[in-house]
Image (tube, rainbow, N blue to C red):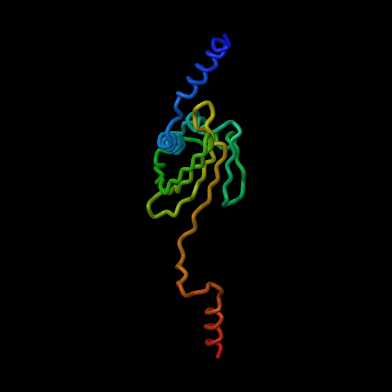
Amino acid sequence: MRFVALAPLVLLAAGCATQERPSADADRERLLARVTQFHDAIREGDKDAYADVFVDDFVFTWSRDGRLYDREAILPNVVPTPDFAPLVDEEIVRIRGDAAIVCFRVRKSADDTGARVTFSCARIDGAWKVLASHGTPIAAPTAPIAPDDPGDGAEDAEAGADAAE
């Protein structure tokens, strides 16, 4: 009799165990699809598609000016931009259960240094949503430091002393 009472619980647990979570590759593709949806929505001026990428209380920080923006502050600025065709590369996706980060570089052209963007995501009701995002403009490249340069300015000081003599 005890077995009969437990049987529905065992069957329920077995059914739950057989429901497969998406593979890491499938999750990666879904997260990168959110990046594409984000950029497509900007190009098309599709406020609904843009809003669908983010949770209602989404927050964006931009390191250029340190400002914080929420979804409602950004949505009015989503207008059709037909010539918007960003180059997205250097994607990094890290998934831990129902949480993920997506980092990528976005540029206007091949000559543009662009910006690094990070999406902090969560799987909510089976769909990946962006909780927060941060963007940092990439500075133009500078001359690399020579391998034997200690980077402490000592050589510059010596050169200045020689010129003064």
Residue shown at 47% from the left, 30% from the top: 49
Above or below: residue 141 compared with residue 103: below
Q: Residue at x 41, y 34 (%)?
A: 26
* Image location (x, y in percent) of residue 3: 55, 12
Find residue 124 and report its image quarter: top right
Indicate the quadrant where residue 25 lies: top left
Identify which residue, 79 or 41, lies in the foreground.
41
Q: Specify the quadrant that holds the N terminus.
A: top right
Let me know if residue 20 appears in the view.
Answer: yes
Residue 64: % across, % down? 57, 52
Residue projecting furthest to the top: 1
Asked whether the viewer can see residue 43, the reply is no
Q: Is residue 29 left or right of residue 55?
A: left
Which residue is at 47% across, 31% downward?
Answer: 46
Residue 85: x and y in percent read: 39, 42
At which x and y percent is residue 42?
46, 37
Does 109 appear above or below 73? below
Of the 4 image quadrants, the one containing the C terminus is: bottom right
Furthest residue in direction left, as rendered:
110
